[in-house]
Structure formats: C-alpha cells, structure tokens
Amino acid sequence: MPLIKITIGQHVLKARLEEHNAPKTCKAFLKHLPLSSRLIQARWSGEAAWIPMGSVDFGVGHENPTSYPAPGQILLYPGGLSETEILLPYGATAFASKVGMLAGNHFLTVVEGQEVLESIGKTVLWEGAQDIKFEVAAP
C-alpha cells in the first residue's frame, strides 16, 4: 500500500496505512482520496484534533479499534453512537464524545513528521480550524 501524504497548513506529514490490521478501513479510505477538510480541536478526547464527517458512510464496522491512540495513530470512527469522524491525536488522548467513550479504527500511523504533531495541535487549539488534505504520496 502507498504512503498517505497529509498536508495541514504549512506542515506535510506522511502516514502508513495499517493494511494488516484494518484492511477494510484502509480500502474504504483510499476510495475517498483526495480528501480535503478542516481540522478542529476535539471537544472530549484530550490532545487530539478531529474532522467531523456527519453521516458519511465508509461502509466499514469496527476494525482494529482503540480508545487510547498514541500521538500519530489516526483513527476513523465509522459512526454509530456519534457521527463519522477522523481523529488525529497529537498528545494524550482518550477518544470520547458527548455520549461517552468511543473506539475508532486505527488505520493510519504517521511515519514522517511526528515531531510537528504537538505544534499542529497547539495551532488548532489556539488559532482554530486548519485546512487538511489527505492524498496518496508520490512514490
């Protein structure tokens, strides 16, 4: 599987698809690329930013779920108790919503640019929403 290029403001990250642990989620995510949105501070999850996606249906259930992702372990929550979303942890995170704890599919892991995650998080927290784009990285 290819690497995914993630552009957030002036920062460019690269992430590995977790194809062995979340193959259905990875395949569904690739169908939505390129994906552009806005990254905002998570309300209940701690040091994480998220992309609310409303009722977008990726057609996957829970796969490689976690509620406590490490910085750079990107989750897709496929919907259910809360809306569909992508969560990007930049520090200590306990994935939750107004209905309580959630578990999201860990499907991407940042492999280049991990050192700027905290800076990205602080920018989102103190300056507001940031543009984000996911696309397949050039070989």
Image (cartoon, rainbow, N blue to C red):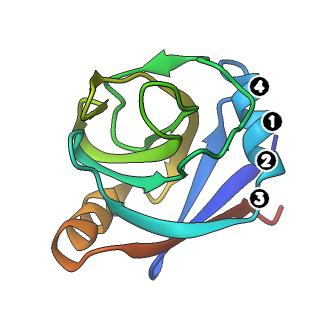
* Observer-nearest of 80 and 61: 80
- Residue 30's label in the rendered image is 2
- Quickly name the residue at label 3: 33
Residue drawn at 59 percent across, 57 percent down: 14
Q: Please state if 138 lies on the left or on the right of 110 as rendered.
A: right
Q: CA distance from mark 1 to mark 3?
A: 11 Å
- Say if mark 1 contacts mark 2, CB within 8 Å: yes
Disc 1 and disc 4 in contact, CB within 8 angstroms: yes
Q: Earlier in the sequence, mark 4 or mark 3?
A: 4
The secondary structure type at the circle numbered 4 is: helix
Residue type, label 2: Leu
> Pointer 2: residues within 10 angstroms few (<14), some, or many (20+)?
some
Q: Return the residue at label 1.
A: 27
The image shows residue 51 at horizontal and vertical percentages of 46, 55
Amino acid type, label 3? Leu
Q: Looking at the figure, which quarter contains the C terminus?
A: bottom right
- Could you tell me the amino acid type at mark 4? Lys
Task: Looking at the image, tell me whether mark 1 or mark 3 is earlier in sequence order.
Answer: 1
